Image: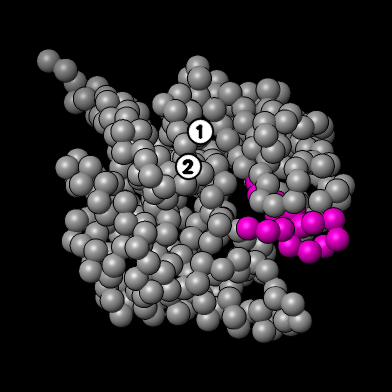
Amino acid sequence: MIARGAILAGCLWLSAALADDHAVVLIYHHVSADTPAATSVTPAVFDRHLDYLDANGFTVWPLSRVIDAVAAREALPRNTVAITFDDAYRSVYTEALPRLRRRGWPFTVFVNSEAVDRGYASTMSWEQIRGLLEAGGEIGNHSHTHDHLVRRHAGESEADWRRRATRDIETAAARIEAETGIRSRLFAYPYGEYSEPLKNIVRELGYRGIAQQSGAVGYLTDLLAVPRFPLARGYDDLERFATGVNARPLPVRAVDVGASSRRAGDIERLRLVLDAGDYRPRQLACYGAGGKALPVERRADEPFEVVIDVTGIGRPGRNKVNCTAPAIDEPGAWFWYSHQWLLRNPDGSWYEG
């Protein structure tokens, strides 16, 4: 006969083995072979991604549930992912929805309401968006105009910019609520662009801010800049997908970044302070645009502190620094942190696109 204590110990071990402190969020746009490659995966590739999740025992949660769990520091199932789509493209309704519904998996679609109101051919209708909700999806706010909200217009004061950005977000919220009855607390930044002032607006309006830089979501994640792994042609092969969905969050305790948008050519450094964890800190490596390795200076061991030289990390535009370290307990698994920079032109003007 097995002792009751042994049974209890076994149950506790099993519970711990099945629980985790992080999740991974995926972002798609189009699911189509006929749309721009930079924002698309084909239906066949999407099938392979879903098959991988199914075959490897992943749990799919809606994004709101993931965010609520990490905010409350609650345990999540091992290998938890959330599947999200930006821009409410019609191919999400025609291609992604049937595939997700067959598996009974939830998903999140971020809606920029002006495109829906104008009836663009590539965008879902409000009726189709309501159909997503009936099929187990959830809706998030992606602004009304899908403008570059981080940018002040020529001659625009900071106060006027704040009013315009707030109005854009709240207009989308009102349209989504009028058409669906849903008042989402999730806001995905258009183009993934955010700044400290824009994050403050998002916080004041009561939203969680959803970004686009890569990385896993954990207890230390900034919930005004939640990372997501982007999937698009050229970056959607199964090996890269597996690396992403098995990623863990680097336990970044503090970040010293200076301004969030700069002129290209400015000399800047990124300082990170990391907690201990199941990663190899001395194998931490950081990369800039195009995968260029960046110099990393280690200044302390406990807590682990590094300074990354990001001089000339890329041309004007949206740029990211990715830092990774191998896991101790699982070969091929990586701890991941990504930081976004918006690099203006050398004269201080904003880049195109």
Which SS class for mark 2?
helix
Please report the residue visible at 44 percent of the width from the left and 28 percent of the height from the top: 237
- Sooner in the amino-acid sequence: mark 2 or mark 1: 2
| Span shown in magenta | 339-353
Q: Badge 1 is on which residue?
A: 234
The spot of residue 1 in percent (x, y) is 12, 15
Choose between 84 and 337: the one closer to the eye: 84
In this view, the residue in front, 193 or 29, is 29
Pick the front one: 94 or 64: 94
Decide: is 261 above or below 153: above
Q: Residue at x 81, y 51 (%)?
A: 264
Q: Is residue 282 visible?
A: yes
Location of residue 250 in the rendering, given as x and y in whole percent from the top left corner: 59, 37
The answer to the question of whether label 2 and label 1 lie on touching residues, with beta carbons closer than 8 A, is: yes
Please give the residue where the numbered disc 2 appears in the rendered image.
37
Quick check: 286 left or right of 325? right
Residue 26 in view in this figure: no
**Lateral position of residue 155 relative to residue 326, left or right:** right
- Which residue type carries mark 2? Ala
Q: Is residue 124 above or below residue 183?
A: above
Q: How far across and down, in percent of the image, does residue 220 sit?
A: 56, 48
Tell me which amino acid carries mark 1: Gly
Query: In percent of the image, x 66 and y 44: which residue is there?
Result: 320
Please state, as top left, top right, bottom left or bottom right, where the C terminus lies in the image: bottom right
Number of residues whose C-alpha sits closer than 10 Å to that of mark 1, classed few (under 14), some (14–19) or many (20 or more): few
Which quadrant of the structure image shows residue 292? top right
Horizontal side of residue 320 vs 95, given as left or right: right
